[in-house]
Image: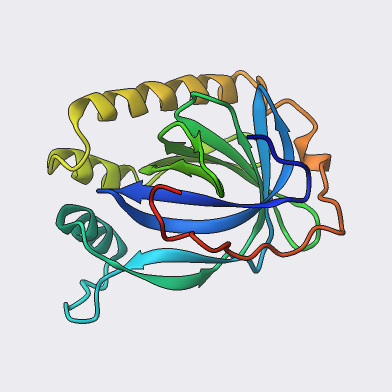
Amino acid sequence: MQWSPGEVIVHQEVWSDRVWAARPLVVAEDSPDRLLLWLPKGTRRKVPMTPPERVDPGDRTARIIGLLERGDWVHVDHVWDVSCLWILRPATWHAVWISWLPSGEQFGWYINLQRPFRRTSIGIESMDLALDVVAEPDLTWSWKDDDEFDQILSRGIFDGETGQRVREEAAAVISRLEGNEAPFNEPWPQWRPDPAWPTPELLPGWDDPSP
């Protein structure tokens, strides 16, 4: 299955055979070696939340860990607050996001550690693996959610093999970042979406874990 620029697809995150989160994206490019997806500011997505019959811990990390451990959650709406382009490559354990301020100025880079994506009838499926790397436009970087990742590993939610694979992937991407290698040395900050592309909306079946 291959998509054309401007088509809307759904990115599903799946955990314990249930959709964990879902968001619509606009296809910018679909080729054998990469998939580019546009996520504009104002896009509405679905995120997991504590069921109303339980007391929510209030703390985001505690909430995420509790939901992953229990394997039950409800979905609530969340509006995306920054426009970004996702750069994904087949069989890789991360995605690179580049984002922009409303002025058009580059906001920064975001390396999202995740399971390799697979194509579905409505889009792609993967699963966020908690650990992230955030970089400024000048490529100075820092960890994000590393404490959450360590807690998830220590509680056995992710197995040791997954933890090792994520750390290896992060180290490899950071090496490219520090070496100013692709995609960080490419002209992505000057990239712009087609102004005719819509703000995407979720497609029917977004909550089906095996479309």
Residue 165: x and y in percent read 33, 23
Residue drawn at point x = 54 percent, y = 63 percent: 204
Q: Is residue 16 above or below residue 163?
A: below
Q: Quadrant of residue 116?
A: top left
Q: Quadrant of the N terminus?
A: top right
Residue furthest bottom in the image = 53
Residue furthest left in the image = 155
Q: Of residues 139 and 9, which is closer to you in this image?
A: 9
Residue drawn at point x = 76 percent, y = 36 percent: 188
Q: Of residues 185 and 138, which is closer to you in this image?
A: 185
Residue 78: x and y in percent read 50, 70
Q: Is residue 170 above or below residue 5?
A: above
Residue drawn at point x = 26 percent, y = 71 percent: 50
Q: Relative to 160, is 181 on the left or the right? A: right
Instruction: State the count of labels.
Output: 0
Residue 25: x and y in percent read 63, 53
Q: Relative to 159, is 172 on the left or the right? A: right
Q: Relative to 173, is 165 on the left or the right? A: left
Task: State the colouring used for the structure image.
Answer: rainbow
Q: Quadrant of residue 39?
A: bottom right
Q: Is residue 155 above or below residue 103?
A: above
Residue drawn at point x = 78 percent, y = 52 percent: 105
Q: Of residues 190 and 91, which is closer to you in this image?
A: 91
